[in-house]
Amino acid sequence: MLRRGEVWRIEGARERLGLVISSDVYNSTDVPIVIVVEVVEESLLRDSPLAVPMGRYVVMPDRISAPMKKWFTDCVDVADTDTMLRVGRALRILQQL
């Protein structure tokens, strides 16, 4: 099962990395998608005031997508609690919550 906080390689329309932000309850259902925010290597970072550093990666909370579960190929990392709190804060700012 895909879990919130995991970073996965996603192969669909284009290959990318995605940090799972949907809840484990949602992810465990038969819904065929998972909600992610894109993760890029630090060298590919473009201007984003909401970017969250994560080791050699940067989480981009303003790049939200819902890829099919079947497109997830490899779990490459797991975000720590602090990173997830910062991503959550950025998502709330984006949505004015």
Image: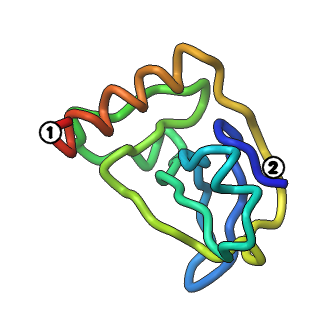
Find the residue positioned furthest to the left. 96
Residue at x 22% of width, y 43% of height: 47
C-alpha distance separating marks 2 and 1:
30 Å
Q: Residues within 10 Å of mark 1 (few under 14, many from 20)?
A: few
Using the image as rendered, state which of residue 25 and residue 69 is in the foreground.
Answer: 25
* SS at mark 1 in the image: loop
Residue 65: percent from the left, percent from the top? Answer: 45, 65
Classify residue 86 by image quadrant. Answer: top left
Classify residue 12 by image quadrant. Answer: bottom right
- Of marks 2 and 1, which one's residue comes earlier in the chain? 2
Q: Quadrant of the N terminus?
A: bottom right
Give the side of residue 36 with respect to residue 1, left or right.
left
Find the residue positioned furthest to the bottom. 13
Residue located beneath label 1 in the image: 96
- Residue contact between numbered discs 2 and 1, judged by CB atoms under 8 Å: no
| Viewer-side label of 2, 1 | 1
Residue at x 33% of width, y 26% of height: 89
Q: Relative to residue 38, is residue 80 depicted above or below? A: above
Q: Residues within 10 Å of mark 2 (few under 14, many from 20)?
A: some
Q: Relative to residue 93, is residue 70 depicted above or below? A: below
The amino acid beneath tag 2 is Cys
Residue 17: percent from the left, percent from the top? Answer: 61, 56
* SS at mark 2 in the image: strand
The amino acid beneath tag 1 is Gln
Residue at x 56% of width, y 85% of height: 13
Using the image as rendered, state which of residue 40 and residue 74 is in the foreground.
Answer: 74
Residue located beneath label 2 in the image: 75
Residue 64: percent from the left, percent from the top? Answer: 40, 58
